Amino acid sequence: MKKVDIYTDGACSGNPGKGGWGAILIYNSIEKELSGFETETTNNRMELMAAIKALSALKEPCEVDLYSDSAYLCNAIQNNWLDDWKSKNWRIGTKNEIKNIDLWEELINLINIHKVTFFKVKGHADNIYNNRCDKLATGEIKKHSKE
């Protein structure tokens, strides 16, 4: 099974507002950058979208180390929140429905294809790949704000 490192980040101008996401896939020494934009979204949706788009870009099942500065994304996986949310029909308590169910379900499908380990990194710090992903995400917002 191929080993791939993925770095992701999402950004939003306003929350909700214009959003961008960025990802860098690294296989051996080959790097591939991906990024995208949405007109009306949230920061959490962009964090999830970055991970989804990056994992979707893999052409075969891979062993993946995915690095994100999103506590929302990493904690949901590492602390088994997803399993808990699913078992409670995507609810917290009796009334509060989990946000972004569509993206969580898409991410679950991808995690079932690939062997993914999530790592939380400090945002806007000394991780060059996280900083590059941030530039990709915010660059998408800037690019589309000029249009």
Image: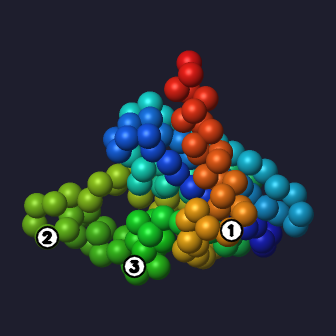
In the rendered structure, the answer to whether residue 16 lies left or right of residue 91 reads right
Q: Which of marks 1 and 3 is nearer the N terminus?
A: 3
In the rendered structure, the answer to whether residue 3 lies left or right of residue 23 reads right
Residue lying farthest to the bottom in this orientation: 79
Q: Nearer the viewer, mark 2 or mark 1?
A: 1
**Rendered residue at 57%/55% (across/down):** 9
Residue lying farthest to the right in this orientation: 29
Compute the Cα span from label 2 to label 1.
37 Å
In the rendered structure, the answer to whether residue 62 lies left or right of residue 40 reads right
**Rendered residue at 65%/61% (across/down):** 130
Q: Is mark 2 on a helix, strand or loop?
A: loop
On the question of residue 54 being in view, the answer is no
Where 22 sits versus 78, above or below? above
Q: Which of marks 2 and 1 is nearer the N terminus?
A: 2
**Amino acid type at image mark 3:** Asn
Compute the Cα span from label 3 to label 2.
16 Å
Q: In which quarter of the image is the N terminus?
A: bottom right
Q: Mark 2: few, some, or many residues within 10 Å (few <14, many ≥20)? A: few
Q: Circle 3 sits on which residue?
A: 80
